[in-house]
Image (cartoon, coloured by chain):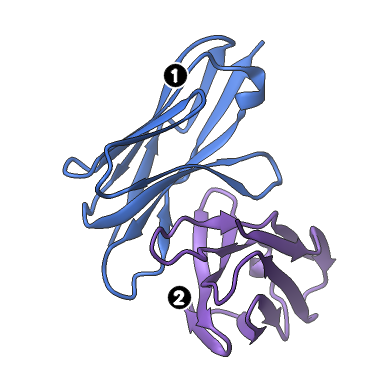
Chain colours: A blue, B purple
């Protein structure tokens, strides 16, 4: 059974800092990995999607990497801003036939202090 | 790209009352559709998924059911709510079955009292 762990559970940084969020998964047989952002009381917003054959994806100040063999992904946020404050969720999709489920980590709650 | 509409945004229901949450998808046809529940401290849990009209698969046995009466409509129901049904319910889709990137709706906060 796939398990996804996100460390740290919470992180507080001053504005302008670069930061890294970590995600690890136990089963390397994944189809893809997706990073989401969730604001309080809101739905999930997709940030980056990395297919199993890819090593990284970039969007603006965000960069996500994937090391499938070691079961790890990182989300790098450059020059953090107060508007980046949210919970960041990592999710993996299994590669098995009929595998429809996304397995989520419990998230990292990020606070960027002005 | 696809857009998901969910309603209502918040709902307070007494124990034993029925439930109907609706989700509709725009911008795609024949999507895979999903219902997830997010409970405090427990992360997101897949409840149901559907690969087509009338096709529902349940991941977790519980007090809830799902239906898909139309291609882009997904409904979550209960005949009698329990206190443990409280949570944040999210509808999702991954219309592109090759890429399998997921899009989520804005969610419904259900409080059973």
State the quadrant of the N terminus of chain A. Answer: bottom left
Q: Which mark is residue B96?
A: none
Q: Residues within 10 Å of mark 2 (few under 14, many from 20)?
A: few
The answer for which chain carries disc 1 is A
Q: Residue at x 58, y 63 (%)?
A: B92
Q: CA distance from mark 1 to mark 2?
A: 36 Å
Question: Is B49 placed above or below A91 here?
Answer: below
As helix, strand or loop, the secondary structure at mark 1 comes to: strand
> Which image quadrant is residue A12 in?
top right
Q: Residue at x 28, y 43 (%)?
A: A54
As helix, strand or loop, the secondary structure at mark 2 comes to: loop
Q: In this view of the protein, which residue sits in the foreground, B93 or B38?
A: B93
* Relative image position of residue B13 (x, y in whole percent): 82, 69
Q: In this view of the protein, which residue sits in the foreground, A7 or A69?
A: A69
Q: In this view of the protein, which residue sits in the foreground, A19 or B71?
A: B71
**Marker count (numbered):** 2
Question: Is B91 placed above or below A40 here?
Answer: below
Q: Which residue is mark 1?
A: A19
Q: Nearer the viewer, mark 1 or mark 2?
A: 1
* Relative image position of residue A95 (x, y in whole percent): 27, 63
Question: Is A81 placed above or below B104 here?
Answer: above
Q: Which residue is mark 2?
A: B59
Q: Given the current orientation, which residue lies at the most extreme left position?
A: A69
Q: In this view of the protein, which residue sits in the foreground, A78 or A113?
A: A78
* Relative image position of residue A58 (x, y in whole percent): 42, 31
Residue B17 seen from this side: yes
The answer for which chain carries disc 2 is B
């Amino acid at each position: 059974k796939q398990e996804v762990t996100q460390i740290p559970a919470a992180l507080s940084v001053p504005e302008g800092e670069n930061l890294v969020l970590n995600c690890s998964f136990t089963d390397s047989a994944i189809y893809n990995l997706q990073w989401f952002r969730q604001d309080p009381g809101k739905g999930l917003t997709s940030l980056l999607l990395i297919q199993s054959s890819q090593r990284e994806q970039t969007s603006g100040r965000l960069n996500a990497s994937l090391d499938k063999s070691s079961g790890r992904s990182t989300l790098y946020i450059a020059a953090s801003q107060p508007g980046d404050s949210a919970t960041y969720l990592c999710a993996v999709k299994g590669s098995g036939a009929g595998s429809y489920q996304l397995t989520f980590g419990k998230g990292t709650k990020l606070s960027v202090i002005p | 790209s696809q857009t998901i509409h969910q309603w209502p945004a918040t709902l307070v229901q007494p124990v034993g009352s029925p439930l109907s949450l609706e989700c509709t998808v725009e911008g795609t046809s024949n999507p895979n559709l999903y219902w997830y529940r997010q409970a405090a401290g427990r992360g997101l849990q897949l409840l149901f998924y559907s690969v087509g009209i009338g096709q529902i698969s349940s991941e977790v046995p519980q007090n809830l059911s799902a239906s898909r009466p139309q291609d882009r409509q997904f409904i979550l129901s209960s005949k009698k709510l329990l206190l443990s049904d409280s949570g944040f319910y999210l509808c999702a889709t991954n219309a592109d079955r090759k890429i399998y990137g997921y899009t989520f709706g804005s969610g419904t906060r259900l409080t059973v009292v």
